[in-house]
Image (cartoon, grey):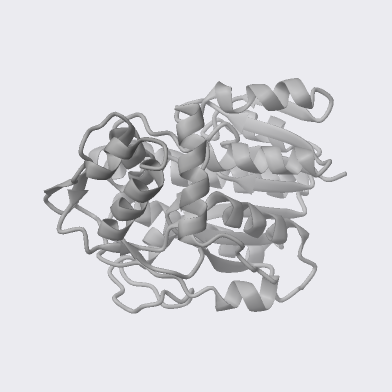
Amino acid sequence: MRKVLVTGGAGFIGSNLCEHLLKNGDQVVCLDNFATGHIENLLPLIEAYPDRFTLIVGDIRNMDDCRKAVEGMDYVLHEAALGSVPRSINDPITTNSVNIGGFLNMLVAARDAGVKRFVFAASSSTYGDSKSLPKVEDVIGKPLSPYAITKYVDELYADVFAKTYGTEYIGLRYFNVFGRRQDPNGAYAAVIPLFVKKFMNHEAPNINGDGEYSRDFTYIDNVVQMNMLAISTENPEAVNQIYNTAFGERTTLNQLVSYLREFLSEFDPEIGKIEPTHGPNRAGDIPHSLACIDKARQLMGYDPKYSMREGLREAVRWYWENL
């Protein structure tokens, strides 16, 4: 039975990781301050696994909370962060405090506690203004937002800790993750849950730009698979590395809207008649994003099971049943 700390475990990705680990028989500690996470994501786990699931309400910006959370842990899955490019543009100081200061606290706490491996959520935003496609891990550009800067600095810190203190890490550059429990509410909701909510309310979603910007949308179960590989791999060449975590397929926003209408109209035919509106491009956004996942395949045995369309159908069903 592994002992795993999931920071940000009440959030979208974190709660899915907690659930998978618990179903696998592991012991899980969740550290969350509920800034963006929700207790509703954890209540079924608290009820179902009272002996193997522990919730610590705390903040990664508080070193005492970090030390308490890592005590006795074998692995850390560090998901806690303030996401969203627009949020970081509106409030770079808080984004920096959480994503860099909090990250460094967790690295130090994990080092001092003798954690075996520190796995963390990196970001495709690190590729910045690099125009090359597909994105390969060792070719990046200049960051285009405060958020992107913070996620790149995290990678640099992890690498320095590995070289200086012998800490083992694996960083996972997530590409536009979506799926069950992704929050459709709030000012910084991600595009898929936001559009689903709009369609279900019979409102027109607003696309930034002409809709031809494209993303490598990645279903949550592929991300869970990658995290599990990251804590279990015994390949020495696989550790102290950064990996793209994606499906390796590009979808435009116009295609996304088309898929959403197709899947949602199976539940409500009226949704198929709703046309999106268009607004200006969003500051800090890159035009296109597509991951090369060859490195993850070769070193980690990564084999994503869900294409964007397959994952989107699953996500739409979940939103229809739960919103």
Residue 200 x/y as whole percent? 33, 32
- Most foreground residue, 60 or 38: 38
- Most foreground residue, 259 or 23: 259
Q: What residue is drawn where x is 36% and y is 29%? A: 185
Q: Is residue 2 above or below residue 128?
A: above
| Quadrant in the picture for the N terminus | top right
Residue 77 x/y as whole percent? 65, 47
Q: What residue is drawn where x is 25% and y is 32%? A: 202
Q: What residue is drawn where x is 84% and y is 25%? A: 51
Residue 239 x/y as whole percent? 69, 68
- Most foreground residue, 7 or 213: 213
- Left or right: 236 with respect to 31? right
- Left or right: 82 with respect to 7? left
Q: What residue is drawn where x is 50% and y is 40%? A: 317
Q: Is residue 287 above or below residue 237?
A: above
| Quadrant in the picture for the C terminus | top left
